[in-house]
């Protein structure tokens, strides 16, 4: 065995505490890389297994296609697969390349899979142009259809054909197709940076402790190459052990995360399993090994090239400056010493500062993105209830008995909740007219009066009481949800919110019927009810839980009232209709005898089966719309994104806390000799603690300032990027969460510093 190998193993055994610290640092850092890669491979394989099966992996259907049109399309380079369906027999036949002309005179349906799913809209626009489908699409909405389930899990939400300037184009309502890839890249980069910083510090401390040994080896004839070999051998041994430990912890951690994900998605039939993909495992191993090499090479080269006298005397980091007694008297001796120590030990404090900056900047960036992602998720998932039952007086349906019977039948899932409400769309005259500050759904009349379309919601007493408590209103108040959504954009739609009405105490609302005088090109109105909608108005931009879809479904102001007030409006409305032989002209919508019941249920699949069983045996069918069944892929996608983001947050906190503890503890251990000298000069334990606290404060203030400066452009980039999806009238930066994190890191640093100082003896 070579001398370098013997010395390497000897050093590993002799410095067992430092070896354990370095090994655990590598293992901890490896865990985050391995877990990220394992989650990617497992989730990707699970999605493919559940969604992308043969004959279900198509992206678009084109119906009633002729043979000539097929010939125009078949040689497009972006087409990967084509399935054909003749005569609507529902039997798909996969065509083999090259796609020769078909021997049929009948029109047929084709199912196309593109080579790049992220370019679905661009490719579909080319298909529309090639086949000249503009006129057909304007007349027939079913000419083209997209595989919404497959596209959604890849981040293209609600892909469809829209007409803009009389030209049909393909648009994804929300395009998250690049978000997952971008997040994965950022995760790996952030974890790699933190990995390198942690390991660099671990190797630097280890090597600094042995500099005198390396210097002595140099003095007796040891070569730089031998010292480098010895250091790398130590790194290889510790790295191999750490990778094995990290791999085992990663498997356990990934299984836990997947179980958590499966518990979220169990109601929609998804079950992700841990998948070991050779290419992903090799990628993660390469990243870990590369990070270990990068982190160890710089301190290793320093150790092998520093001069012998500098290593033995350890003078290379010490700089003496003339004392400034006036400054010391002004700021205090302890603070002066703390500042001097920070300047003298720049390398040690620079590592801690960089680590804190990376942790805080990453936390701020991810927190801001989560805030905006949650806001856009409301657009994507739309519903925060699972289903809705609609009844009217013509049907003899006792929905309360229906729901209570479900609770009795499925006692283990007795968590069903329901909310009763009625809705009516109205034209409302607003006085003074200048209180209308939007142009959306507004009509102007000859006397300069203005009306706006509004939705009136009557809530059951429990829901209404919860709403007024939430916004600190009083019973009987009219709650106006004042945010109006506007949709803009061509290739990708953007969603913006703005207030519709001015918050005026003199506001007066009257229910009207509106009609158009086409001969004179003007609008007229008649007042139906000018009393029922007047009272104390409370404006808010917060929606009650279980009703958040209303701001997407109706782009008008919404008035929430209690059921008694709503019934009064209904009576007045019916009275007006009965007194007008021609009935009401131009009102928005509403069914006077309609009642809707919103349902929140843990197992919506089970509830759906229950409704099907009832409908199978009775004449009066129960009209139920299942929101979460229809939007399950959207919800899955959002849940996966949020789980990944929350995992990143937890990882940042763990890395920041553990690394801060290790670095501060190791740094103080290295300075024991300095503290002994201070004790010999008359310093007390209290003086030492003050010095350490001041050092910690200075270092933390510097780190926080740098983090804030770096976070500004990052947050700006996130906000600008998310502006392609959603435009808000406020900035969603979670200041409270960020401040809590920074405070927590500061307190941990102080506590660790003070606890570590207890190991320093006064004599």
Image (cartoon, rainbow, N blue to C red):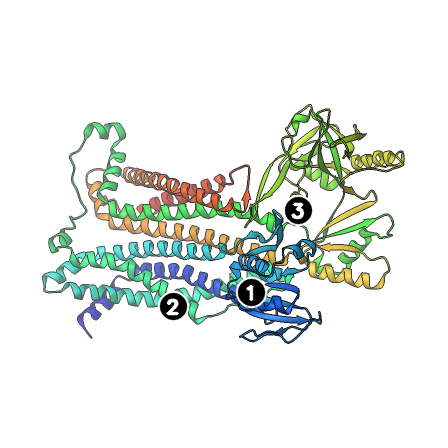
Would you name the residue on which mark 2 appears?
244
Rendered image quadrant of residue 215: bottom left
Report the residue at 65% width, 26% height from top: 434
Element on which disc 1 rests: helix
Would you name the residue on which mark 3 appears?
549
Callout 2: 10 Å neighbours few (<14), some, many (20+)? few
Q: Position of residue 424 (x, y in %)?
A: 77, 40
Report the residue at 55% width, 67% height from top: 48
Counting residues from the start of the chain, the first of labels 3 and 1 encountered is 1
- Kindly report which numbered mark, 2 or 3, lies closer to the viewer in this rendering: 3
Report the front residue among 492 and 219.
492
Q: Is residue 192 left or right of residue 1?
A: right
Q: Is residue 556 left or right of residue 6?
A: right
Would you name the residue on which mark 1 appears?
47
Q: Position of residue 635 (x, y in %)?
A: 60, 55
Q: Which mark is residue 233?
A: none
Counting residues from the start of the chain, the first of labels 2 and 1 encountered is 1
Report the front residue among 521 and 18.
521
Report the residue at 62% width, 62% height from top: 147
Q: Position of residue 688 (x, y in %)?
A: 28, 40
Element on which disc 3 rests: loop
Q: Marks 3 and 1, how far apart in space?
A: 27 Å
């Amino acid at each position: 065995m070579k001398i370098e190998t013997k010395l390497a193993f000897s050093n590993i055994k002799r410095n067992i505490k430092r070896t354990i610290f370095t090994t655990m640092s590598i293992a901890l850092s490896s865990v985050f890389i391995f877990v990220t890669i394992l989650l990617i491979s497992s989730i990707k394989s699970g999605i493919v297994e559940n969604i992308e099966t043969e004959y279900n992996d198509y992206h678009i259907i084109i119906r009633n296609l002729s043979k000539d049109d097929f010939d125009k399309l078949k040689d497009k380079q972006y087409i990967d697969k084509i399935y054909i369906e003749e005569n609507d027999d529902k039997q798909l036949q996969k065509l083999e390349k090259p796609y020769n002309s078909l021997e049929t005179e009948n029109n047929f349906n084709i199912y196309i899979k593109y080579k790049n799913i992220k370019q679905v809209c661009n490719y579909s626009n080319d298909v529309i142009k090639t086949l000249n489908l503009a006129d057909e699409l304007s007349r027939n909405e079913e000419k083209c259809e997209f595989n919404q389930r497959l596209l959604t899990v890849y981040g293209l939400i609600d892909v469809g054909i829209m007409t803009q300037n009389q030209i049909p184009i393909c648009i994804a309502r929300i395009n998250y197709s690049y978000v997952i890839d971008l997040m994965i890249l950022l995760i790996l980069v952030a974890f790699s940076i933190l990995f390198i910083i942690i390991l660099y510090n671990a190797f630097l401390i280890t090597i600094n402790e042995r500099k005198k040994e390396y210097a002595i080896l140099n003095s007796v004839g040891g070569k730089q190459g031998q010292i480098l070999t010895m250091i790398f051998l130590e790194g290889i041994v510790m790295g191999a052990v750490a990778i094995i430990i990290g791999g085992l912890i990663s498997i356990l951690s990934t299984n836990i995360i997947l179980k958590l994900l499966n518990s979220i998605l169990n109601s929609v039939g998804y079950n992700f399993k841990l998948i070991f993909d050779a290419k992903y495992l090799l990628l993660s191993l390469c990243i870990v090994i590369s990070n270990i090499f990068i982190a160890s090479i710089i301190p290793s080269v320093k150790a092998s090239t520093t001069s012998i006298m500098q290593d033995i005397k350890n003078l290379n980091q010490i700089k003496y400056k003339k004392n400034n007694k006036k400054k010391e008297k002004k700021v205090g001796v302890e603070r002066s010493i703390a500042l001097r120590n920070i300047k003298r030990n720049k390398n040690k404090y620079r590592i801690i500062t960089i680590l804190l900056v990376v942790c805080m900047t990453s936390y701020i960036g991810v927190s801001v993105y989560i805030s905006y992602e949650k806001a856009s998720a409301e657009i994507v998932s739309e519903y925060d209830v699972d289903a809705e039952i609609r009844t009217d007086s013509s049907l003899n349906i006792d929905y309360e008995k229906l729901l209570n019977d479900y609770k009795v039948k499925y006692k283990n899932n007795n968590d069903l909740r329901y909310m009763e409400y009625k809705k009516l769309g109205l034209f409302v005259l607003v006085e003074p007219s200048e209180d209308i500050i939007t142009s959306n759904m507004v009509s102007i009349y000859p006397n300069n009066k203005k009306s706006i379309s509004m939705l009136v919601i009557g809530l059951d007493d429990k829901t209404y009481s919860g709403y007024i408590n939430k916004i600190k209103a009083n019973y009987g108040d009219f709650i106006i949800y004042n945010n109006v959504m506007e949709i803009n954009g061509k290739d990708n739609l953007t969603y913006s919110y703005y207030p519709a009405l001015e918050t005026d105490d003199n506001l007066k609302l009257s229910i009207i019927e509106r009609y158009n005088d086409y001969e004179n090109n003007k609008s007229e109105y008649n007042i139906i009810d000018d009393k029922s909608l007047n009272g104390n108005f409370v404006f808010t931009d917060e929606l009650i839980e279980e009703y958040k879809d209303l701001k997407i479904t109706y782009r008008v102001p919404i008035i929430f009232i209690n059921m008694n007030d709503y019934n009064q409006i209904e009576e007045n409305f019916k009275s007006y209709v009965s007194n007008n032989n021609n009935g009401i002209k131009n009102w928005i919508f509403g069914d006077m005898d309609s009642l809707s019941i919103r349902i929140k249920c843990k197992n919506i699949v089970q509830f759906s089966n229950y409704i099907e069983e009832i409908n199978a045996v009775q004449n009066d069918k129960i009209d139920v719309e299942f929101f979460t069944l229809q939007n399950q892929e959207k919800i899955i996608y959002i849940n996966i994104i949020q789980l990944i983001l929350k995992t990143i947050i937890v990882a940042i906190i763990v890395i920041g806390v553990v690394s801060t503890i290790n670095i501060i503890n190791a740094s103080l251990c290295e300075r024991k000799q300095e503290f002994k000298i201070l004790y010999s000069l008359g310093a007390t334990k209290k003086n030492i603690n003050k010095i350490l606290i001041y050092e910690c404060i200075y270092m933390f203030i510097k780190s926080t300032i740098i983090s804030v400066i770096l976070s500004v452009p990052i947050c700006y980039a996130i906000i600008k990027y998310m502006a392609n999806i959603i435009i808000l009238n406020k900035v969603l930066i979670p200041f409270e969460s960020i401040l809590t994190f920074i405070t927590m890191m500061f307190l941990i640093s102080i506590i660790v510093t003070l606890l570590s100082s207890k190991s320093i003896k006064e004599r």
